[in-house]
Amino acid sequence: MPQGFFSTVGLTTSAKRAVPLLPRCGECKLNLNCQSPKMPVDGQGKRGVLVVAEAPGREEDLHNRPLIGAAGQLLRRCLDKIGVDLNRDCWLTNSLICRPEGNRTPTDNEIGHCRPNVVNAVTQLQPEMILLLGATAVKSVIGWLWKEDVSGVGRWVGQRIPSQKLNTWVCPAWHPSYLERLSKTRDYPVLEKLFVEHLEAAFALKGRPCAVVPDHAAQVKVLYNSNEAVQFIKQMQQNNRPVAFDIETDRLKPDHPEATIWSASLSDGETTISYPWHDKNVKATLKLLRSSVPKLGWNAKFETRWLSLVCGVRINNFVFDGMLGTHVLDNRSETKSLKFQAFVRLGQDAYDAEIKPYLRGVKSGGNEPNRIREAPLAKLLLYGGLDALLEWLIDVAQAKELGIALAG
């Protein structure tokens, strides 16, 4: 094993900058050019739901109340179909609490300046569900909750996110103004039906996501002692429960003659272990992979090629691949990564910021070695263990939704 494997070199991160939580109203200056600056939260919130829309329009600015214009009326009509009264059952606010001139789309800077007002509303009201209407609301709230880039609204619409940070359901939907703009097109009936279905699914959620918010990192056993690791691996093989398997490697593809596996992780849902790829660990792991124990993974092609080329082992009984499951269940773009699915299904924030710099190739686009040998071992193993545990949780849930039995 290369000397750098047990390196304790300090960590360089690429984490997204912390979200400021102090309002910066003086910088955007929108309050100087509207009739109702700093619009207050409205509604009675009988169901404990906070609705976050985009920004006040002309009617809202005129009357100092959110969601009373044409888009708000469309939203009310759709909610009437599922027995929800917007003002009685919800609290109402906007991502921007001052009207942008000409009803233009808010800029990212304006969203950032006003985000603390949304955060304050969430903190004070403690909603059980937050309904996000449109891209601006998604950028505002999910941009606070998730460390990764939010990107477009398309991959978020219809998700029901059990936010661990808030222990609150976060449910993105289209902004009703989007439907209003398309109301005269032939697509409108389908869009309205989907919009109502998204609203119905969101309002069907009862209570908070978790009685106790899970701590997935605390469930990972980081094992440095080979004898201890082997004991756990053998026990997993004897239990014959479906096992999620994950490896960390020194490059993307195993075709290079110096391609090296650095660590491995296993989870059967009850026990999750992560350990260096050396000594007795390798022999015990390969024996498990050859066995009939059902195997789970994410992009199973990766592990299959690596184990085949580097170790000469064919993984037996690979029964479910969560990436393929995502393709079947939700074939939208930008939804297939484990990190995204862990957030929208489990509320798990991105956990790779500290390790990601070490897993990138020295040169982009090729099969150059990464910097994994410089990564602090404890952080690398924790990262791999979280991968395995989250793969197991999501794979099992997807298999249940698809009616697939995973038992050996």
Image (cartoon, rainbow, N blue to C red):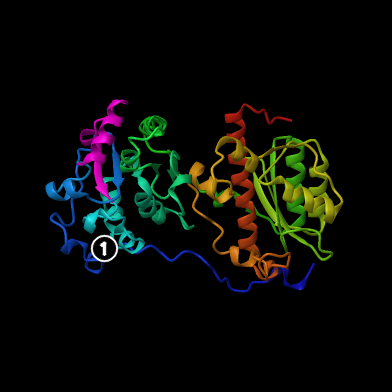
Q: Residue at x 42, y 38 (%)?
A: 209
Q: Percent from the top left, x then y, of residue 16?
A: 46, 64
Question: Which part of the image, by quadrant, shows the N terminus?
Answer: bottom right
| Left or right: 408 as drawn, with respect to 193 | right
The answer to whether residue 271 is above or below residue 401 is below
Q: Percent from the top left, x then y, of residue 137?
A: 34, 50
Question: Which part of the image, by quadrant, shows the C terminus?
Answer: top right
Range shown magenta: 69-94
Quadrant of the image occupied by residue 405? top right
| Amino acid carrying mark 1 in the image | Pro
Furthest residue toward right: 312
Q: Nearer the viewer, residue 329 or 353?
A: 329
Mark 1 closeness class: few <14, some 14–19, many ≥20 residues within 10 Å? some
| Residue 84 belongs to the span the image colors magenta | yes
The answer to whether residue 11 is above or below residue 107 is below
SS category of the residue bearing label 1: loop
Q: Residue at x 32, y 40 (%)?
A: 176
Q: Nearer the viewer, residue 77 or 209?
A: 77
| Residue 71 belongs to the span the image colors magenta | yes
Q: Which residue is label 1 attached to?
A: 23
| Left or right: 35 as drawn, with respect to 27 | left
Furthest residue toward front: 185
